[in-house]
Image: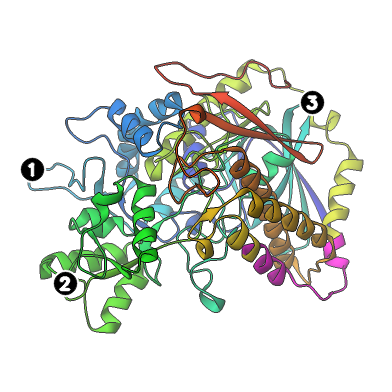
Amino acid sequence: MKKKELSTDVLIIGGGTAGCFAAMTLGKEKNISVLIAEKANIRRSGCLAAGVNAINAYITEGRVPQDYVDYAKKDADGIVREDLLLSMSERLNHVTDVMEKAGLVILKDENGKYVTRGNRNIKINGENIKPILAEAASAQENVTVLNHVNITDYIVKDNRIYGAYGFDVNEEIFYVIHAKAVICATGGAAGLYRPNNPGFSRHKMWYPPFNTGAGYAMGITAGAEMTTFEMRFIALRCKDTIAPTGTIAQGVSAKQMNSNGEIYETKYGLTTSQRVYGTVMENRAGHGPCYLKTDEITKEQEQDLYKAYLNMAPSQTLKWLESGKGPSEQNVEIEGTEPYIVGGHTASGYWVDNNRETTIHGLFAAGDVAGGCPQKYVTGALAEGEIAAEAVLGFLKDEKQTAAKDVDSEAKQNEKQAEYEHFLNNPQGLLTTEQLEETMQKIMDQYAGGIATDYRYNESRLALAKEKITSLQKLVDGLAAEDMDDLLRIYEVKERLVVCQVVIAHLLARKETRWHSFAENADYPEKNADWEKYVNSRMKDGKIEIIFRELVTGGKHYEHTNYTK
């Protein structure tokens, strides 16, 4: 492989929602160089690639940021970082205004006010939201975009970051990127568990299949502290298409109904996890399939739903049209997805301070990869990108800089390059990358609380999951890559396996059931007040160490006091 060395003041890993907005913010400081490394192309990468039809985190008229904090805290049953939620919530309307000025179409009524959808949402025409973000970021004079480069490892010494290693996904190029500060904005992790749809359609899932937990894995292996991986996210979605249900539930006030015609949602509760749990329980009781009751909506509402799904999940509109029956004629069947690890909906991710700095000095996290602050959605990710970028500016002014060459030796570079070339030179064995990935998903599904067990697990099953995932990790070295795209797939599986390790450790550590379905512990089926704490972890010498931390509430702030402790 050819080696390329680059230097920048700030490296942003991931050109999705948070990464692009961080670049836009840093673009205001023309004397600072910024490099975005994105494994796809920032124009259509990340969670916004296909578009979105609403801003789901917004402080509507008559409400204040603390109201949003209270909502997110209730939905997560208390296991949140209130300081992070508040600093995010205070910026939700600001970043929305920035996006509108950049070209995002926000629907307005006859009085010129935003059209709301529920208490915290506003309607948009968001099919082009990602190109708008990408163009705004790349237009900055001091921002360089490096598309099609997959970052795999941080350059860290004495718990301080100095850049990262990666490779081009199209050409045989090994990248060494030196940076004074790094913002990780790689998103969460999909594909850990066996998905709803088999075979050719297996990637028709709720969360982007390209989000493989890369940022998590890099942080974990570098010794960063992580939080709340046991609060998995399971989405309630339209069956088969895995299209969002919130558009229907909130847009036309459709209720969850079983096959007997009974509305069951109030029976189990209305938090995000309870809506999934109720559907699981009704199916287990023999009352399935379950639906969103839409057969009484008007034709005008039906047309609105067609248009809304064309903005983000066209397959749902196509399914209605192909069947010849729209939602006004037939109820919409629903199901839960496989579990995901995503800090934009739950509290999973890096343990950060209020500036979004991780426990690795100089490494910041924003968006789905940052923990402690659930219910971010799009605007929350934008807000965290801005918070991290502003903190980086202060960091660069205050921090005494060490020359990268004093940290990153040529021997280390050669070692990483040899690792990549190992897979390119390997002869093809009996096991393919795809087979290893499917085996991993089956193990997680059956032993770590996937769809097959109605999301339930116990300590015996988790012990087997841990053993089997560890065995799979030993097989990765035998995988072969014919080209750089194959090499990318190998590293995506490596990343997912690391995240699986941490998920299993966290599920074992929290000995209660606080969030039904999200963490359904059959050994401990009840909620326990003793577990009103964060379950954190850190990898040391290849092993996951669990750390318990007290809740940050009541206007308090958590700030890292000792990075090496």
Q: Residues within 10 Å of mark 2 (few under 14, many from 20)?
A: some
Residue 436 within the segment the image draws in magenta: yes
Asked if residue 298 lies left or right of residue 407, the reply is: left
Residue 158 is labelled as: 3
- Nearer to us of marks 2 and 3 is 2
Residue at disc 2, secondary structure: loop
Residue at disc 3, secondary structure: loop
Q: Residues within 10 Å of mark 3 (few under 14, many from 20)?
A: few
Residue 405: % across, % down: 84, 32
Residue at disc 1, secondary structure: loop
- At 29% from the left and 46% from the top, the residue drawn is 270
Residue 461: image quadrant is bottom right
Q: Earlier in the sequence, mark 3 or mark 1?
A: 1
Asked if residue 465 lies left or right of residue 305, the reply is: right
Q: Which residue is mark 2?
A: 328
Q: Is residue 449 visible?
A: yes
Q: Please report the bounds of the magenta region as a residue range.
A: 422-441
Look at label 3 and name its amino acid.
Answer: Asp
Residue 111 is labelled as: 1
- At 57% from the left and 27% from the top, the residue drawn is 392
Q: Residue furthest left?
A: 110
Residue 260: % across, % down: 22, 69
Instruction: Give the main secondary structure, helix, strand or loop, of the magenta stretch.
Output: helix
Q: Is residue 467 above or below residue 406?
A: below
Residue 422: % across, % down: 87, 61
Q: Foreground residue, 119 or 503?
A: 503
